[in-house]
């Protein structure tokens, strides 16, 4: 299981991410007696094409291209709603976009590292963050109900190329 941003952002066998995500989805649906209809499955597959979040319009366009017929927005929103409810995908609020979850069915932090350059988003499992946020909430008498943490920066690939094309060093002038 990919649990760190370095792995997600580095060249890897993404086919394994996809097949793992789809088999977890089948298991979770079976366990909660929910049906992974073809539209729901297609939306999940589209979100797992890469590690870049997609908005509802992008999903609508891509699903239409895939099926060769026009897709009504409610169809997309219902599929998104279903996948969110089962925890198979997350919504990244600041991007108003969705991404597949690598750890569905487990209690985790919803912590994302989002690259400002290439747009990839890695969900990272980090023990301890939830405790910290729970303690901070308790201290403020705040009843914490949900959380999404978005960190913005450069992924390992983009920080490497930024360093290479960065300020010219004396020897390549
Ligand atoms: Zn992958
Ligand atoms: Zn997740
Ligand atoms: Zn990047």
Image: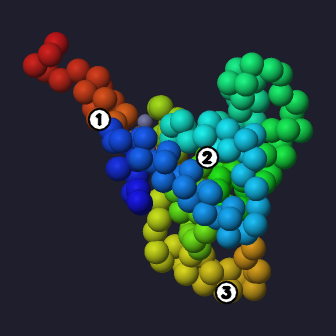
15, above or below 127, in the image: above
* Residue named by callout 1: 160
* Rendering quarter of residue 166: top left
Left or right of 127 in this view: 29? right
* Residue named by callout 2: 99
Secondary structure found at label 1: helix
67, above or below 100, in the image: above
Image position, residue 104 (x, y; %): 59, 63
- Nearest the camera: 139 or 45? 45
Labelled disc at residue 83: none
* Residue named by callout 3: 139
55, above or below 133, in the image: above
Secondary structure found at label 3: helix
| CA–CA distance in space, label 2 to label 3 | 32 Å
User: Which of disc 1 and disc 2 is earlier in sequence?
Assistant: 2
Q: Nearer the viewer, mark 2 or mark 3?
A: 2
């Amino acid at each position: 299981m990919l649990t760190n941003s370095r792995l997600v952002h580095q060249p890897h066998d993404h086919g394994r991410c996809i097949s793992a995500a789809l088999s977890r989805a089948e298991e979770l649906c079976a366990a909660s007696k929910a049906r992974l209809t073809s539209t729901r499955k297609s939306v999940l597959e589209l979100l797992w094409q890469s590690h870049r979040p997609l908005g509802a319009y992008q999903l609508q366009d891509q699903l239409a291209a895939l099926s060769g017929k026009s897709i009504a927005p409610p169809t997309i929103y219902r599929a998104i709603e279903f996948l969110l409810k089962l925890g198979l995908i997350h919504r990244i609020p600041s991007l108003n976009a969705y991404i597949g979850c690598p750890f569905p069915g487990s209690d985790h932090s919803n912590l994302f590292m989002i690259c400002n350059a290439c747009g990839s988003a890695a969900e990272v499992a980090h023990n301890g963050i939830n405790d910290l946020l729970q303690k901070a909430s308790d201290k403020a008498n705040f009843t914490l109900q949900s959380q999404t943490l978005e960190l913005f920066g450069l992924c390992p690939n983009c920080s490497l190329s930024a360093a290479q094309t960065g300020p010219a060093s004396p020897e390549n002038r």
